[in-house]
């Protein structure tokens, strides 16, 4: 029986290294994972392509997707819609790919509510001091922006217990290995493996 993929949702503080971590995971296991592509009503930026960075749609098209229940989750941000198309995720999972979705905490918890088998992973640096160092080390944000992101992290930390696993992103290769192992272990959960369990039950009955 072909193994169906699972959905893993990754959240974490700004500056925790989520993007770097997932890029390294996909490079290490290119045939195993697919990064979910969001739909958005914002116009494409220079160099962006439809179906690669985002699915670019009109506001009417997006609202039609909402009405049809075609989105796993969605949100409005700075006047534009962003959401995760259900069909794209389902197609990847049916093809055996484990799909990784990077979204904020509120959206992650909504996904878990709708799809209980979803694996929730929260990425954090080893300490608050290291988080501040990483934010300041970017050299692209003002002190005001850094303080704002740290204040937001205080609020986000209140929801960390809602996640299935905590990933401490201290050493990249170690964190990539841990993320891969956690996602693959999810395939062995009885809820996720219910189709396989039913298959072997039927085979045993025929013996």
Image (tube, rainbow, N blue to C red):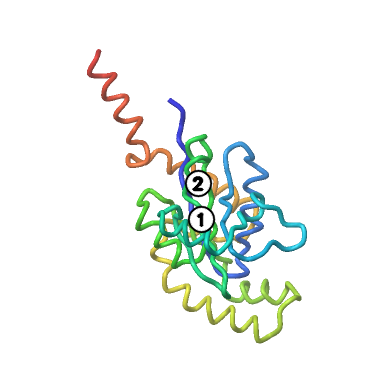
Image quarter where the N terminus lies is: top left
Residue 24 horizontal/vertical position (percent):
66, 50
Q: Is residue 9 above or below residue 138?
A: above
Say which element carries label 2. Answer: helix
Image quarter where the C terminus lies is: top left
Q: Is residue 26 above or below residue 166?
A: above
- Of mark 1 and mark 2, the one earlier in the sequence is 1
Query: How much space separates mark 1 and mark 2, taking CA atoms?
Result: 8 Å
Residue 120 horizontal/vertical position (percent):
44, 56
Question: Residue 112 vs residue 202: left or right?
Answer: right
Question: Count the marks: how many?
Answer: 2
Residue 110 horizontal/vertical position (percent):
39, 61
Q: Is label 1 in contact with label 2 (beta carbons under 8 Å)? A: yes
Question: Residue 200 vs residue 137: left or right?
Answer: left
Q: Nearer the viewer, residue 139 or 112?
A: 112
Q: Which residue ends up furthest to the left in the rendered image? A: 205
Q: Which residue, given by chain and number where applicable, does mark 2 sit on?
A: 89
Q: Nearer the viewer, residue 173 or 196?
A: 196
Quadrant location of residue 196?
A: top left
Q: Nearer the viewer, residue 50 or 97?
A: 50
The label on residue 84 is 1
Q: Which residue ends up furthest to the front in the rendered image? A: 60
């Amino acid at each position: 029986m072909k193994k169906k993929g699972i959905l893993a949702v990754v959240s974490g503080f700004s500056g925790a290294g989520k993007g770097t971590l997932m890029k390294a995971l996909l490079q290490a296991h290119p045939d195993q994972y697919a990064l979910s592509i969001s739909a958005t009503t914002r116009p494409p930026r220079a160099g962006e392509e439809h179906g690669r960075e985002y699915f670019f749609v009109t506001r009417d098209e997006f609202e039609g997707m909402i009405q049809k229940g075609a989105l796993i989750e969605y949100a409005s941000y700075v006047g534009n819609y962003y959401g995760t198309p259900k069909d794209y995720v389902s197609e990847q999972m049916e093809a055996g790919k484990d799909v990784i979705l990077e979204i904020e905490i509120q959206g992650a918890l909504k996904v878990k509510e709708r799809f209980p088998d979803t694996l929730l992973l929260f990425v954090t640096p080893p300490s608050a001091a290291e988080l501040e160092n990483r934010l300041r080390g970017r050299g692209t944000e003002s002190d005001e922006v850094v303080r704002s992101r740290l204040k937001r992290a205080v609020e986000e930390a209140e929801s960390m217990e809602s996640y299935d696993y905590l990933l401490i992103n201290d050493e990249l290769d170690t964190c990539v290995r841990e993320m891969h192992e956690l996602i693959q272990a999810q395939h062995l959960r009885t809820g996720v493996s219910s189709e396989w369990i039913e298959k072997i039950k039927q085979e045993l009955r025929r013996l």
